[in-house]
Amino acid sequence: MNTIGELLARDLGQPIEEIIKVNQIDEESVYTEITEYIATERILEQYRSLLKAIADEASEPSEAIGVWISGFFGSGKSSFAKNLGYVLSNRHVKGVAASELFKNQIKDRRLGEFLDLINTKIPTEVIMFDVSVDRAVKRTNERIAEVMYTVLLRELDYAEDYDIAELEIEIEREGKLDEFIARCYSTYSIEWRVVRKGAQKIARASAILHALDSVTYPSADSWALSLRNKSADITVGRFVERTFDLCARRRPGKALTFVIDEVGQYVARSADKIEDLRAVVEQFGKVGKNLLKAKKVLAPIWVVVTSQEKLDEVVAAIDDKRVELAKLQDRFKNRIDMAPADIREVATRRVLSKKDAAVPILQQLFKESQGQLNAACRLERTTRKSEVTEADFVQFYPYLPHFIELSIEIMSGIRLQPGAPKHFGGSNRTIIKQAYEMLVSERTAFAKQPVGTLVTLDKIFELVEGNLSTEKRNDIDEITQRFKDNQEDNGMAPRVAKVICLLEFVRDLPRTLTNIAACLVDKVGQPAPVAAVEKSLKLLYDAKFIRNTEEGYKLQTAQEKNWETERRSNSPRPRDRTKIIRESLRDIFSDGRLKTYRYQNLRNFSVAIKADGNTINDGQIPLSICTAASEQEFTAKVTDIRNESRQESHNNDIYWVFSVNEYIDNLVAELYKSRQMVAKYDQMRVHNKATNEELACLQTEKSEVLGFSENSGINSTDSGKRGNN
């Protein structure tokens, strides 16, 4: 086994879908989704609990028929809901009952028993749809009851137009629907199912009614005219009543379950929509309970919805006193959250599972390089675990274990960009797809790489680049072109820029030199490329592609580039530098511990401090702080001050000499530049002349000033390195 692909158990010739859609009914796709489904123990327990509740509800009726399945985009909630729908309805997929396929894949006895009971005792019709697809495009205020009713009509083979559907329902009740359909074909030579979707449906239906019953409809347009000024709206109560009635007609002997995807997104920040959802579930619960007790139905109607947010998070985002969380929780007593803890296991079992013969090879590779690997890939200033164990190395290879979590956060962050594709984000499906593409894509082709090669963050960039903003992609392209002929850089600058770009989407991980280098370790046993990364960071900084902030390095936006150009044009004069150093010394010695000296625990003496001859504060013990403008001048300065200190007038004076090294000099210059920008744009802000982009840069710069000020106050002494009394 010489290549990574040879280590893997999966047939890489079998592609993987990007996401699960409940309305995707292609048999081949559904078959693959069920037979490749990975259920962790936590997911299995959630299925057991929910299926038990569904089974029990038929004999012990309550009103708890709402199910809220939450999880960030792609966390597996749609897979969970879709599989639930298929096993409840027990549809045949490629000639095999869905429940049998699912049980064979899951191999869980208790879950199988619940399924067998439900399929035998409670045959169920399942209506699955994505509310973002089936909602009316032109009506942003369409209520969930209206969406559900429209889908119900379609699934039960009624017209989706409410007026036409009402006509069908009424004449069906009277036993005249078949005659109506036949008259339609004999009159227009077109099937009624086609006519009822056309623009002339009202006029033609009216004409057919006239032909069938000229007494009730004396003219061809009698029925059409009767619809004028008539409201076609449907109330929650009427919708629930109609659902039980129509199911009894068209699906006799069956229970019904709604599975509705992306409801959280649909009701987001709308008190009216979430209240409508609550009312629908509440009414289904009450009516279903009563009908079940009266033995008029086989089981209550369940409403299963999915959301990227938990129920309490949706309510919190709405922030409307009309929406009461407790009432919603009563309606959705069955709440399932797809936890991120399952994602790593699901992703690796689907794609990165290893052949038995590959395990000892990877174990040996880890043992030979364990110390070097952990040292090279260790992340700093973060609570994230980056230590690699043997078991994790075998399971996740060629990924580092913590790269899975990083990938999830990166893709979740990308999805939050303005204009980002709706169906893209951190997910087990997306991580599965990414891991698969990492192996087979021409841009990465890790399946062909030799064993020992590691996935680096810049390789992940290659797979998600198309989902980044145009500005970021252009920046990376420009960086690549700018440094492609730089022999010393050897292609490292674009790699560093790609890592910075992706880490900007990750919280709790500063984009420091160490962390960037740790994300670019591309082979087991190699050290982190710290020196190469450091050189590239300087190249990128000097070329104004990046800046260093409190969170670490970041790619500059167009506005930030303009800001940085102006900022760098502010260069401090010697007197400006002297002033800043003096201010820093004053700040340092404002500390009470440095302003006094206690002699043998007997008496306190105040310290009189001068900086380059300028008094900072008065006191009893004279201390003169003397600055050498550079390290080169330090020796000469010490000689001069030593001679001065030997004069009789300075017998009781204490002297301290330090040099302004490159670190302090740069710190002073940066502080000066930041102060100049803050002063200018604060004034513009006061007069409402600053743009929003400039105000954002101003806020960042103020944080920079604070950071520089703190560093200049602390490190001017610690970093002087050379001093003399």
Image (spheres, grey):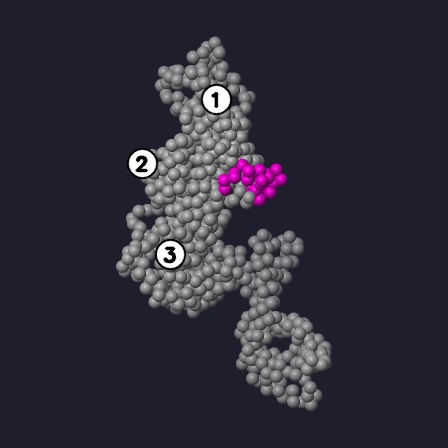
Tag of residue 96: 2
User: How far apart are the alpha carbons under marks 3 and 2?
Assistant: 34 Å
Toward the viewer: 95 or 410? 95
3 or 2: mark nearer the eye: 2
User: How far apart are the alpha carbons under marks 2 and 1?
Assistant: 37 Å
Q: Quadrant of residue 687?
A: bottom right
Q: Which image quarter is the C terminus in?
A: bottom right
Tell me which amino acid carries mark 2. Answer: Val
3 or 1: mark nearer the eye: 3
- Is residue 693 placed above or below 614 in the rendered structure? above
Residue 236 image offset from top left, x and y in percent: 54, 29
The residue carrying mark 1 is 166
Q: Which image quarter is the N terminus in?
A: bottom left
Toward the viewer: 477 or 12? 12
Of labels 3 and 1, earlier in sequence is 1
Per the rendered image, the range of residues in magenta is 314-335
